[in-house]
Image (spheres, grey):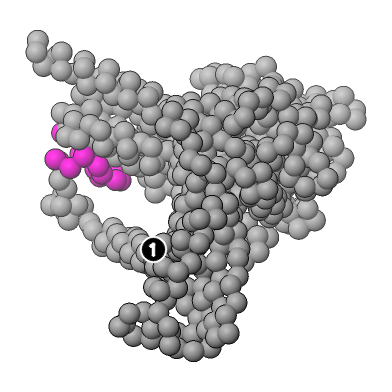
Amino acid sequence: QFHLDNIVCFFSPILRASGYQSRCTSISTRIPVCTQGRAPMPRTFGLSHMSAPLRAGAGRWQVAMPSSRINYRLRPVRAAASDDEDVENLVIIGSGPAGYTAAIYASRASLSPKVFCGFSKGGVQGGQLMTTTEIENFPGFIDIAGPDLMDRMRAQAEKWGSELLLEDVESVDLSSRPFVINGTETKVKANSIILATGATAKRLEIPSEHEFWSRGISACAICDGASPLFKDQEVAVVGGGDTATEEAVYLTKYGKHVHLLVRGPTMRASKAMQERVLANSKITVHFNVEVEDAFADKKGAMAGLHLVDKETGEKRDLLVKGLFYGIGHNPNSGFLDGQVEMDEAGYIKNRHGGPWTSVDGVFSAGDLHDTEWRQAITAAGSGCQAALAAERYLTGNDLVVKCQLHDEDDMQAEQAEKAEKAEKERSKEGAEREKKDTQTLEEEFNLYADKHRGQFALRKLYHESDRLLAVLYTSPTCGPCRSLKPILHKVIDEYEGRIHFVEIDVAEDPEIAKAAGVNGSPTVQMFMNKERVANLPGVKMKSEYRKLIETHLGTAKAAEKK
């Protein structure tokens, strides 16, 4: 028998003297192991059994003994940065499958990555899957909603220690070392960068696009399809790829009929999606058509589209209440300002078929460089490649400045406990909501609580509240809604006792959304004394919500004084 703590005490000074930090990941032994009077440990045991001095570092090292084997993670560590220059190992710009996968691998490698998830630029935080309904080709899931998959990836990245920043990157400086990343609110220096900003949906740029945007024209059927504006109406989707066909199928849940406008002679979607569209009686496919413009009815609402046949030149009108874009994407590379080699379209040119860009220490992942495959699984794979390449770059150039330590057993137990608790709470809330009738809601309603949900609470507060009333309209499949909720909740918490907040699900309460004139989700409306004082569709910066709240709270206070 031997004592593990004695081994730690023996090896740690040697490691420190050699300029190394170590992390013992496991010990395999052929004899029982005791730890100073405690019960014998198993023949193979993990990090939770290790003493504190061993919980650090990365890399690998192995010490062989006649009766045992100790596996260490080991890496030379640079001296800490000065107080006025805190340098990160790695910054990941972008979320989605590529960004989150890179974050998972980098954080598990103890690189403590900072992740700029994005906010308003370059599409939705979480990437294009946040606007996708059912995913049936991601390994491990027979089918899963895009936002649900992204929520899981984000949670996994956070679990291993990634720091997620909900803000955009305005610019980067790749000419200096370390690199400089300028976010909307945060400035960061880093020894390596992974670019995973993906691409943004293209627009048709028809003459009336601005007039009808969010009032009939949208680039996200998943976000806006459940809106009362399109319920039981005929709508159109332009495009012939997987995005367009998926949106067409999704819209049949809400619309009376869907017209798929394909600008060429054939669809470019996968065979499975083409078959699904052609077999759906609620979808009509129009080939070789171009959308010239949209037109309004006498009330100013969108009434239809002017179409032209690309082969014959014949013009005709199609009566629809909505038009959804599914015509491709543009790479989100403008913030790089040409500091990395790109092609004419703005996609990054990678080297050697891997994640390496033209700048050492800068790596690319996902749709920012992929002009061919454009799949969630290939984006995730390239995120893995970029993280591994970044780790090798940092290690090979002696650039690791700090490491984050993980007790894997404790973290897994904590994560499982949180998930189980959250699931129980959701089930309990759902069951309780089903049982409650109007009388019960009336009895349980608390006028003094800050946050509420559902049409009963909205009607009650609209008539009885003397506070500023903020209403968030969401839909169950809306990716941007999931991004906005935690942001808005944090803002509301800053005004405890001064604001009433209500969340309305437009799928559960469509009549409320219709009466409020809500044409898409998320939308935030604010009311004061039964008068609507603000209408904010989409996701805005926290500062914009704060400014509105402060303005109207100040107005109310001034009125009270008078």
From the viewer's side, name the closer residue of 366 and 390: 390
- Report whether 149 appears left or right of 471: right
SS of the residue at dot 1? helix
Instruction: Give me the residue at 85% from left, 25% from top.
Output: 314
Q: Is residue 421 visible?
A: yes
Foreground pick, 419 / 432: 419
Residue appearing at x 75%, y 37% in the figure:
357
Please report the residue visible at 48 percent of the width from the left and 30 percent of the height from the top: 85
In the image shown, does 362 or 396 lie closer to the viewer? 396
Magenta span includes 387: no
Q: Residue at x 58, y 51 (%)?
A: 76
In magenta stretch: residue 448: yes
- Residue 338, given in percent of the width and then of the height, sits at 72, 23
Instruction: Tell me residue 501's x, y (percent).
Output: 27, 37
> Which quadrant of the rendered structure holds the C terminus?
top left
**Magenta part of the protein: which range?**
447-464
Q: Residue 89 appears at what percent x and percent y?
A: 55, 42
Residue 282: in sight, yes or no? no
In the image, residue 87 sits, relative to residue 67, either above or below, namely above
Which of the 4 quarters of the picture holds residue 358? top right
| 138 horizontally vs 538: left or right | right
Tell me the amino acid under the disc marked 1.
Answer: Ala
Question: In which quarter of the view is residue 289 placed?
Answer: top right
Tell me the quadrant of the picture where the N terminus can be found: bottom left
Question: Tag count in the figure?
Answer: 1
As drawn, 375 above or below 39: above
Q: Position of residue 78 (x, y in %)?
A: 54, 44
Residue 494 relative to residue 215: left or right: left
- Residue linked to disc 1: 52
Q: Where 423 sits versus 121, above or below? A: below
